[in-house]
Every structure is written in structure tokens, then in C-alpha cells.
Image (cartoon, rainbow, N blue to C red):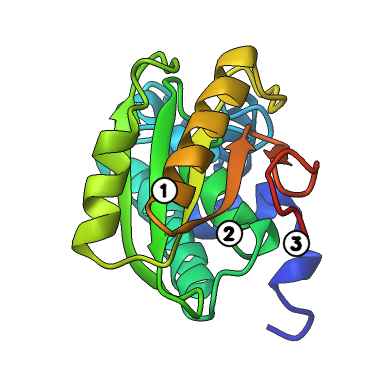
Amino acid sequence: MLQGLKRLDNSELLCLLLGSGTRRQTVEKLASQILRRTDNLRTMFAIQPEELMRIEGIGQAKALILCAAMELASRALEAKAVSEPILGPEDVRAWFQAVYGTQSQEHFAVLYLDIKGRLIRYKDLFVGTLDQSLIHPREIFREACLVSAASILLVHNHPSDDPLPSMADLDSTSLLEEAAQLHKMRLLDHIIVGQTSCFSFREHGLLDGND
């Protein structure tokens, strides 16, 4: 309480959440095993209660407490991101890395924004191996027209943790930018996220009218 939680290391924070150990496992040992299983927290947002329960000494209650903490953190990042206008990748980077960075499958989501950059709607549209044929403008802009969006922001993840765009990513983004222009909307950005890094098309000058 006197020095603040930021002074604690990862193991000590996990000990606080776990509360106690068991007769056979100290709470410190449980925390150490969690860190090993999650690659020192890199995959913590994606871990499931059943996987945590494979660790001796972690039952359903402790597993749910840990996963609830991750879900709450993810929702806090989302709430922070959408409380102000979304004007660029820095406004959503942490949120999307938390949501998608550790996913084992590719996800493609769209943020629909009003003229001031405020979030109108957020939809996770496609899941699975993504290519140009799967990500069809019709699905994206049907929703955009329904909510009268002024701009859209695209995001998808690379489970490989390499956020550099593939040729399919480049081709599909070019197609979607053309579609946005036809619909009199702005493609604000396309962000690719991994566990530890992300790539912004706008920051790298890959969108027309880059500013």
C-alpha cells in the first residue's frame, strides 16, 4: 500500500491474485509455474481456465480469478480507447494487442466511426485463414452504411507475431480503400497486431492521402 503495485514484480502480482498456495505448493511456486506456462505473461490474455487448472494447486476458483483479471484488463483498455475520439493507431494499439495479440487464429475486425472519430460500432467480422477473397467489401460496407459511418478502421492479427503485411494484406487493403472512397468514407488505418508488436498501414505511408 505504501509503495504501490508498480513496485511488485510479475510473480508478486500473481501471488496477490492467487491469495494462497496449497499444502504441496507455495503460492510463490504456483506463480512461477504460471509465468512459465504463459511465457512470462506474453500469452496471459489468451489462456483458458482449463489450461491453468493443469497446474497442480490451481483449481477452478483460482483459474477463474486469473482469467477474470485478464478479461477486466481487456475491457478497461477497450473502455479507455473508446472514451475519446479515435484518430490513429496509438489510440487503439494496446486494446487490440490485448484482444487479438495472443489469438491462435486470425481475426479481422472493423471499427465504424462518426465524423469526429467516435466509435459507433465495433464488429469482429472474419475468423480463420484470411485472404483477399474472404475479406469482401460487401460485408464491411453494408454495416458502415447501416450506421452512417464517416470512417472505418481495420484491424487483424498475425498469430505468428510478425506484423508485417503479406501480399494478400496489401491487396485486400488496397481493394478496401477503393471501396471506402466509392462510399465517400475514409479508411483511417489498417492495423496488424501480434503479441509484442503491431504495424500501421497509415504510419508506413501505405494508404492514399497519408497524413
Q: Residue at 72% across / 25% down in the picture?
A: 164
Give residue 92's mark: 2
Classify 10 Å Cα crowding around label 2: few (below 14), some (14-19), many (20 and above): some
Residue type at numbered disc 1: Leu
| Residue 186, x across and y down, in percent | 52, 58
Q: How many marks?
A: 3
Residue at the limit of the structure toward the front, as seen here: 182
**Quadrant of the frame with the N terminus:** bottom right
Q: Return the mark for residue 182.
A: 1
Q: CA distance from mark 3 to mark 2?
A: 27 Å
Q: Is residue 79 above or below residue 55?
A: below
Q: Which of the marked residues, 3 or 2, is nearer the chain's N terminus?
A: 3
Residue toward you, 110 or 175 = 175
The amino acid marked with disc number 3 is Leu
Q: Label 3, on which residue? A: 8
**Crowd class of label 3 (few under 14; some 14 to 19; many from 20; radius 10 Å):** few
Seen from the viewer's position, the closer of residues 204 and 35 is 204
> Considering the image in quadrants, where does the C terminus appear?
bottom right
**Circle nearer the viewer, 3 or 2:** 2
Secondary structure of the residue carrying numbered label 3: loop
In the current view of this chain or complex, which residue is farthest to the left? 146
Mark 1 falls on what kind of element? Answer: helix
Tell whether 77 sits left or right of 130: right
Distance from label 1 to label 2 (Cα)? 26 Å
